[in-house]
Amino acid sequence: MLRLAILPVKTGKLNYHKIFNQIKKKQSYLCVGLDTDLDKIPSHLKTEPDPVFTFNKAIIDATHQFCVAYKPNIAFYEALGPKGWESLQKTLDYIPKDCFTIADAKRGDIGNTSSLYARAFFEQMNFDAITVAPYMGEDSVKPFLKFKDKWVILLAHTSNPGSADFQLMESKVTNRRLYEEVILKAKTWATPDQLMFVVGATQADKMQHIRELAPDHFFLVPGIGAQGGDLEMVSKFGMNKQCGLLVNSARSIIYASEGKDFAEAAAKEAKLLKEQMSRFLELDQKL
């Protein structure tokens, strides 16, 4: 049963309980993906000095009451060069302090390089979390885990069609699939207070099994909305006793309208998801 009493907050900015307290307070586990594409934002914004930040600012103003996290996809900003990085930093600085911030960067390299990636996103930019690819193993992930009150969100079973190419390969030694090995091994590197897993919403049929593998960890779940993920199935099989979910939606919220009402349309979509999440939290509480 999901008990929604507010828990005592430990010392430190972003322990597990503090994230859960925000979920309780807002009755939402929504993460808004800021995948801001200059080709898709409303045309009237393109004459602004910084159209990306202007767009993001309006989206944040319209949605922050309905979500607990924001996830800029770093590629959309990197592609714009130095000005894109400037827009990203301004966006990050503008996000309300009670919202969890995720750098969707999917970094992961040999140890000294990972250390520099970690410094860039945790020290220089001050993100709360970063997505990390596990393919190179422990020494490529551990440098990110050395930062106090920062989080690693490790790719486990993703929502893209190509995830089956490697993630579903089965070991002849353990009879486990690769994504299962990733989860079980990574759990030995860090506690649920610092490590989350990416589990795609389009993998909802496997969500219950994945939750059994990692009963106490948060899952970042992309794929709701434009990618066709089922929020009800994800919530039913993915929740743990402290919710344990951050469900991301990007395109269906931020591009809900191409007109001057884009912010109002984004708020409407975010509110709808928040209301659905609130019902799922209440339903689970009654079990």
Image (cartoon, rainbow, N blue to C red):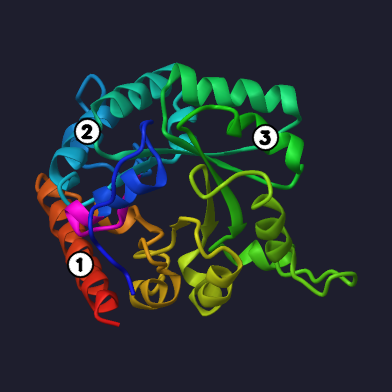
Q: Mark 2 points at which residue?
A: 96
Classify residue 54 by image quadrant: top left
Residue depicted at 29% across the width and 59% down the height: 252
Q: Name the residue under label 1.
A: 278
Residue 258 vs 78, above or below: the answer is below
Q: Which amino acid does label 1 sit on?
A: Ser
Q: What residue type is labelled 3?
A: Lys
Give the distance between the C-alpha atoms of the residues marked 2 and 1, in whole angstroms: 21 Å
- Magenta residues span 24-33
* Left or right: 202 as drawn, with respect to 248: right
Residue 220 vs 109, above or below: the answer is below
**Residue furthest out toward the right:** 173
Relative image position of residue 170 (x, y in whole percent): 80, 71
Disc 2 on helix, strand or loop? loop
Relative image position of residue 120 (x, y in whole percent): 53, 21
Q: Mark 3 points at which residue?
A: 142
Disc 3 on helix, strand or loop? helix
Relative image position of residue 256 (x, y in whole percent): 22, 56
Relative image position of residue 49 (x, y in whole percent): 23, 19
Whether residue 255 can be seen here: no
- Within 10 angstroms of label 3, few (less than 14), some, or many (20 or more) residues? some
* Left or right: 263 as drawn, with respect to 39: left
Q: Is residue 30 magenta?
A: yes
